Image (tube, rainbow, N blue to C red):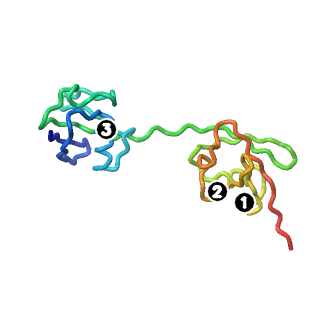
Amino acid sequence: MDIIIKFLSGPTYPLAVNSSITVGDLKKRIQQLSGDVPACQKLSNENGINFSNDSSTLSALGLKSGSFVVVLVTNPPPIPPIQVFLKNEKGQTSTYDVTPGETVTAFKSKVHIRERVPVDQQRLIFEGKQLDDGRTLEDYNIRSESTIYLTLRLRGG
């Protein structure tokens, strides 16, 4: 069946779908059209009835060929910060508020401000692995209350 996807921001697209697909599947198809991730899409029919259950099929919602699906794109919810611990070579532990998507480089800057250790002299270790600049804390599976170890990279000469 052919339905019409209408974004509240203006654009309208025809879309051929099977009536047995779910709202979640439809959101993925809409993402292919617009680039908007499913978590940021709020769908409803032209009468304002929300399609809040991603497992409902389009036929169960009463959609037919020619039906309009209205799409409201929302901002993603902010990612709450987590607390991690940094243990230095003296055995002192400090607490830092970070987000999982934060880069190692950004975290090193926070460490520099509080610990007064230049970024280029920091070696951060988590679960035996050195944290590389440009990667995120999430890449290393760093979670709330994880402990990261700070060792110094001394410049020889």
Q: Are marks 2 and 1 in contact (CB under 8 Å)?
A: yes
Disc number for residue 105: 2
Q: Quadrant of residue 2?
A: top left
Question: Along the horizontal axis of the image, is 13 left or right of 123?
Answer: left
Q: Measure the alpha-carbon separation of dots 1 and 3.
A: 45 Å
Q: Quadrant of residue 67?
A: top left
Marks 2 and 1, the one that precedes in the sequence: 2
Viewer-proximal residue, 59 or 157? 59
Numbered disc 1: secondary structure = helix
Q: Residues within 10 Å of mark 1 (few under 14, many from 20)?
A: some
Q: CA distance from mark 2 to mark 1?
A: 8 Å
Q: Which residue is mark 3?
A: 25
Q: Residue at x 31, y 38 (%)?
A: 25
Is the residue marked by circle 3 packed among few (<14), some (14-19), or many (20+) residues within 10 Å?
some
Q: Which residue is mark 1?
A: 119
Element type at mark 2: helix
Q: Secondary structure at mark 3?
A: helix
Q: How many marks?
A: 3
Q: Which amino acid is tagged 1?
A: Val
Residue 53 locus on image (x, y percent)? 33, 27
Between marks 1 and 3 in the image, the one whose residue lies nearer the viewer: 3
Q: Amino acid at mark 3?
A: Asp
Q: Residue at x 60, y 55 (%)?
A: 135
Give the percent coordinates (x, y) of residue 46.
18, 32
Q: Amino acid at mark 2?
A: Thr
Q: Which quadrant of the rendered structure holds the N terminus?
A: top left
Furthest residue in direction left, as rendered: 66
Query: What residue sits 78% from the left and 51% below the top?
Result: 150
